[in-house]
């Protein structure tokens, strides 16, 4: 019933084991959607990439996400608890921080921006699958509700990241790395403060 579904949602929202990893993936998605929204302005308008070649850029960036996702279970087996998620968030922060530094240092080249972006996307590829597993695993009896709520948070994070991109009174660079770095910092704070007592063997 609808009432039971919403009861499950409210039950999950007060569980730290659900909220902490869910907020981590939410912050990652905020940076990702901000990149989706800004990429035409960066690569077509700023760097002069033709629309046809611009369509190939996701083919390059997706490999960084795949590589992060491929590494995630191996990192989880090696490091217990939230440590692999923290590593992914730190990589996101380093990548976005480097992009921010490049944007203020002068006139960065396309491959410089793309290189630090790949670093960010690799970290995001680590964070998203592990955060989803950590949020779902303690609640097998509410797996459907938990999965739906995670999806809601991820899309909400993407919407917030895209909205902030349009609200910041800055050019596209540095506006994009500010949003990506802000999401990474907020995600790190949520995990470090909310997951202090978390002990979970990765798989």
Image (cartoon, rainbow, N blue to C red):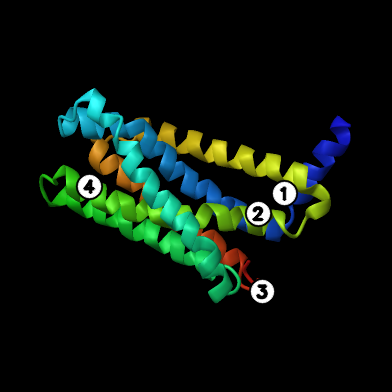
User: Relative to 200, is 40 above or below?
Assistant: above
Tag 3 or tag 2, which sits nearer the N-term?
Answer: 2
Question: Of callouts 1 and 2, which one flags the residue occurring earlier in the amino acid sequence?
Answer: 1
Q: Which residue position holds label 4?
A: 113
Residue 26, how many percent across, how many down?
54, 46
Which image quadrant is residue 4 in?
A: top right
Which secondary structure, mark 3? loop
Q: How far apart are the two marked residues, 1 and 2, measured between alpha carbons? A: 6 Å
Label 2 or label 4, whichever lies nearer to me, is 4
Q: Quadrant of residue 140?
A: bottom right
- Kindly state the secondary structure of the residue where label 1 is placed: helix
Give the distance between the C-alpha atoms of the residues marked 2 and 4, in whole angstroms.
32 Å
> CB atoms at circles 3 and 1 under 8 Å apart?
no
Residue at the image point whose x is 42% and y is 56% from the top: 67
Callout 2 environment at 10 Å: few (<14), some (14 to 19), or many (20+)?
many
As drawn, the label of residue 199 is 3
Q: Is 97 above or below relative to 180?
A: below
- Within-10-Å neighbours for mark 4: few <14, some 14–19, many 20+: many
| SS label for mark 4 | helix
* Residue hosting label 1: 13
CB contact under 8 Å: marks 4 and 1: no
Q: Nearer the viewer, residue 58 or 88?
A: 58
Quadrant for residue 6, please give it.
top right
Q: Measuring 29% from the left and 37% from the top, which residue is drawn there?
A: 57
The Cα atoms of the two marked residues, 4 and 3, are separated by 37 Å
Label disc, if present, on residue 19 of the rendered structure = 2
Earlier in the chain: of badge 2 and badge 4, it is 2
> Is residue 43 left or right of 152 when viewed as pictured?
left
**First in residue order: circle 4 vs circle 3:** 4
């Amino acid at each position: 019933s609808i009432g039971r579904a919403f009861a499950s949602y409210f039950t999950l929202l007060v569980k730290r084991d659900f909220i902490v990893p869910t907020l981590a993936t939410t912050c990652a998605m905020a940076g990702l959607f901000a990149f989706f929204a800004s990429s035409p302005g960066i690569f077509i308008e700023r760097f002069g990439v033709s629309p046809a070649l611009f369509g190939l850029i996701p083919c390059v960036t997706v490999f960084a996400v795949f590589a992060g996702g491929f590494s995630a279970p191996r990192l989880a087996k090696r490091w217990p608890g939230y440590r692999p998620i923290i590593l992914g968030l730190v990589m996101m922060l380093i990548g976005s921080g480097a992009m921010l530094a490049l944007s203020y240092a002068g006139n960065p080249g396309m491959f410089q921006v793309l290189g630090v972006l790949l670093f960010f996307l690799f970290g995001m590829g680590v964070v998203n699958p592990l955060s989803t597993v950590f949020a779902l695993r303690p609640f097998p009896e509410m797996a459907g509700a938990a999965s739906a709520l995670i999806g809601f948070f991820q899309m909400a994070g993407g919407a917030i990241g895209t909205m902030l991109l349009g609200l910041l009174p800055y050019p596209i660079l540095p506006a994009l790395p500010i949003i990506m770095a802000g999401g990474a910092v907020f995600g790190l704070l949520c995990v470090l403060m909310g997951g202090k007592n978390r002990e979970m063997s990765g798989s």
